[in-house]
Image: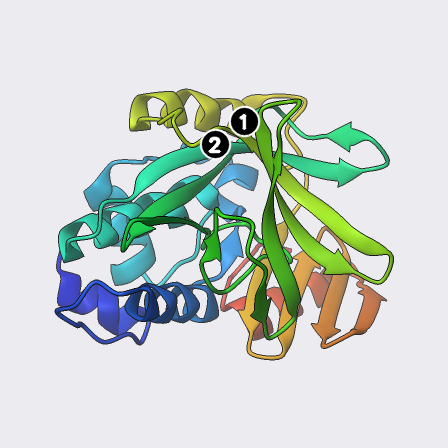
Amino acid sequence: MDIRKYLERIQAVQENELTIEYLTHLQKSHVLNVHFENLDIINKKPLSLAKEDIYQKIVLAQRGGVCYELNGLFYHLLMDLGFKPYLMAGTVYIGDGVWAMENAHLFLIVPVDKKDYLVDVGFGGKCPRIPVPMSGQEVIDSDGKYRVKKDEEKKCFYLQKEGVEGWEILYRFETPLHKWTFDHVNSVCVLTETSVQSKFNKKYFFSRVMEEGRITLLGDALIIVKGRETIKEKLAPHEIVEKAHQHFQISIPM
């Protein structure tokens, strides 16, 4: 993997000091320049989590990917730069008491200056562009406030975003002492590709983060978020093709 080309892909610079400021720069650059997309899953093309395969897809072919690919490759970048990240799996909260497949979302925990931070470049929805301290400290991103909340009783953590009615759960995960490996991730990735419970193998899910919000194509719906304003548009089949190309540079068949 060519670090220089990877940094060029995400429009980031290389620095010698491994500070929280540099980690923030890398994370924000990544989410603003590499989109989330499940096109390969929809097309039934098996995903590969091998380092060089993801590098070829995301960096050389200028594609996006799902969480296993995006956070997986970002893990390798951070390692090559000298950080010591580790893999974590979380369970996404859908809403109304419903959770997605258990431990089906991959993200990272990154220690910097003896403090741990949640880092995620592959959530595909409303997710922080900056590291969130595991200490519970709130951080202010361009689209609102985020925090990690510890549940002492259930011995788990929640990534939360402040909404109009209070703090909303994005996903939950176990104590950071539970370190995952790519072997664990591979098996979960296959389930995400093939399981009837998976929401990623049923319709297009493309999402691009912008400075002021995000654009998401979900099935036949185009959702544009700017600040606190949300615009949702139902698309005809030919419009899905047009919007996928316009906003994500993705070619999909009619």
- Contact between labelled residues 1 and 2, with CB atoms less than 8 Å apart: yes
Q: Is residue 215 above or below residue 138?
A: below
Few, some or many C-alpha atoms within 10 Å of disc 2 (few <14, some 14-19, many ≥20)?
many
* Residue toward you, 164 or 250: 164
The circle drawn on residue 89 is 2
Residue 55, x across and y down, in percent:
25, 51
Q: Nearer the viewer, residue 168 or 91?
A: 168
Whether residue 152 sits left or right of residue 231 in the image: it is left
Front in this rendered view, residue 106 or 53: 106
Q: Amino acid at mark 1?
A: Asn
Give the residue at x 46% y 51%: 120
**Whole-percent x, y for residue 209 in the image:** 56, 68
Read off the residue under disc 1. Answer: 103
Q: Earlier in the sequence, mark 2 or mark 1?
A: 2
Q: Name the mark on residue 150.
A: none
Confirm whether residue 225 shows in the render: yes
Q: x, y (%) of residue 88?
A: 42, 34
Looking at the picture, which amino acid does disc 2 mark? Ala
- Taking 46 as reference, is 7 above or below it? below
For residue 128, what is the image quadrant?
bottom right
Q: In front: 235, or 189?
A: 189
Q: Residue at x 78, y 60 (%)?
A: 163
